[in-house]
Amino acid sequence: MISTKEHILEAIRKNKPQGTQYPYPVIPSFPKSSKDIVEEFKENLILNAGTCFTINSIEEGENKIKELHPKAKVICSSAIEFPGNKDLSKVTDPHQLDDVDVGIIRAEFGVSENGMVWLTEKGMMVTSLGFLSQHLIILLKPQDIVRDMYEAYARINLRDNNYGCFMLGPSATADIGAVMVRGAQGARSLSVFFM
């Protein structure tokens, strides 16, 4: 009796195109949005329960962090602009970040069509910072926003990082009754600081 695997492979062999070279399919050129790229990013981030602020100085950023998270005791940052009070360079086990109230990370770039940011292991230093923090502050230069996912994938360099992920707003999950819960598998809030 033939196994399911062999049955599938035999069907593929029978239906494989003839010849030795198979061109890649042509990727169509989809129309692009004409909206202001930063405004479109903001709109889509807000639609996904994120917030954004234009920050003009380190002092203004520090004040905004205190305003957004006045009860935060542990602030851990992989960004040089805001050192926080937990030294990320001393973390030897990802579980040591389970007490972080506010995590601060610089994104490599953002995507305006959906309000996502691209985070890498180099940007996070310890990847669990992006997922164990109760609240995330993502630093993003407005000029580092691309229009859509086609541009985003063209910009990703997987050879330079062992890990990267797109992040869109705070963590959220909903059950079949459509009850939304924020922070179930990650950050309860996500704010982007344009700086």
Image: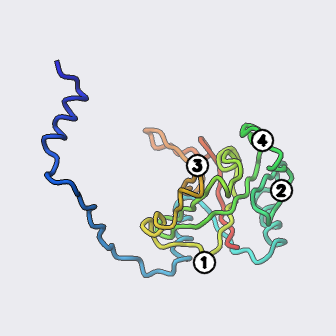
Residue at mark 4: 99
Under circle 4, the secondary element is loop
Q: Is mark 2 in CB contact (under 8 Å) with mark 3? A: no
Count the labels in the image.
4
**Residue 53 picture location, percent across and down:** 68, 71
Badge 1 density bin: few <14, some 14–19, many ≥20, Cα 10 Å = few
Query: What's the amino acid at mark 4?
Result: Asp
Q: Nearer the viewer, mark 3 or mark 1?
A: 1
Q: Nearer the viewer, mark 2 or mark 3?
A: 2
Under circle 2, the secondary element is loop
Tell me what residue is drawn at x 49 percent, y 43 percent.
174
Which of disc 1 and disc 3 is earlier in sequence?
Answer: 1
Quarter of the rendering containing residue 1: top left
Query: What's the amino acid at mark 3?
Result: Ser
Q: Is mark 3 in CB contact (under 8 Å) with mark 1? A: no
Disc ID at residue 171: 3
**Residue 115 picture location, percent across and down:** 53, 65
Give the distance between the C-alpha atoms of the residues marked 4 and 2, in whole angstroms.
Answer: 13 Å
Query: What's the amino acid at mark 1?
Result: Gln
Tell me what residue is drawn at x 22 percent, y 57 percent.
21
**Residue 125 picture location, percent across and down:** 71, 52
**Residue 106 picture location, percent across and down:** 68, 63
Quarter of the rendering containing residue 168: bottom right
Disc ID at residue 84: 2
Which of disc 4 and disc 1 is earlier in sequence?
Answer: 4
Front residue of 47/6: it is 6
Residue at mark 1: 143
Which of disc 3 and disc 2 is earlier in sequence?
Answer: 2
Give the distance between the C-alpha atoms of the residues marked 3 and 1, in whole angstroms.
Answer: 26 Å
Front residue of 12/185: it is 12
